[in-house]
C-alpha cells in the first residue's frame, strides 16, 4: 500500500464488463512526507474519493478483492481517504 493524491478522473465508455459502474481516478504516488514521488497510475475507487484528496492505495491481487470475488481486472484500488499523517 502507499499514499497518493487524486489528481483527476478517467472516463472510459468502453471497458471490461466487470468494470462497469466503477469510478476510475488518476492518482500520483506520494512520499511519507506527502511530497510528490513522480509516478501516476489509474486506480478504481472504493471509498468515494475526490480530486485533491490524499488516499490509501492498495496494489496487486488484494486490490482486486476489494470489489468482491476477484473477477474484475483491477490492479490498483483506493481503499481509504486519509485524515492525517504523522511521521516520527
Image (tube, rainbow, N blue to C red):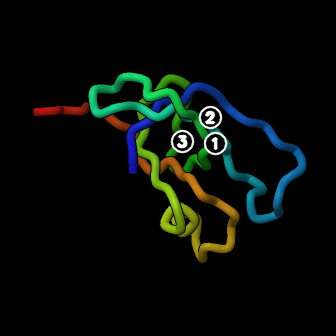
Taking the image as shown, residue 21 lies to the left or right of residue 1, namely right
Task: In the displayed orientation, state which residue is furthest to the left.
Answer: 88
* Secondary structure type for disc 1: strand
**Which residue in the protein does label 1 denote?**
42
Viewer-nearest of discs 3 and 1: 1
Q: Position of residue 23 (x, y in %)?
A: 67, 45
Identify the disc placed on residue 34. none
Q: In percent of the image, x 39 and y 45: which residue is there?
A: 2
Q: Is residue 50 above or below residue 47?
A: above
In front: 80, or 32? Answer: 32
CB within 8 Å, label 3 to label 1: no
**Which residue in the protein does label 2 denote?**
26
Neighbourhood count class around disc 1 (C-alpha, 10 Å): few under 14, some 14–19, many 20 upward: some
Q: Position of residue 4 (x, y in %)?
A: 45, 35
How far apart are the alpha carbons under marks 3 and 1? 15 Å
Res 74 → quadrant = bottom right
Q: In percent of the image, x 53 and y 68: which residue is there?
A: 61
Identify the disc placed on residue 48. 3
* Secondary structure type for disc 2: strand
Amino acid at each position: 500500500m502507499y499514499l497518493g493524491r487524486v489528481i483527476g478522473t478517467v472516463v472510459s465508455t468502453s471497458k471490461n464488463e466487470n468494470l462497469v459502474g466503477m469510478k476510475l481516478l488518476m492518482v500520483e504516488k506520494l512520499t511519507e512526507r506527502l511530497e510528490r514521488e513522480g509516478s501516476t497510475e489509474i486506480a478504481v475507487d472504493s471509498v468515494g474519493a475526490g480530486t485533491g484528496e490524499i488516499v490509501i492505495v492498495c496494489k496487486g491481487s488484494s486490490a482486486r478483492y476489494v470489489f468482491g470475488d476477484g473477477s474484475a481486472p483491477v490492479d490498483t484500488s483506493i481503499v481509504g481517504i486519509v485524515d492525517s499523517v504523522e511521521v516520527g
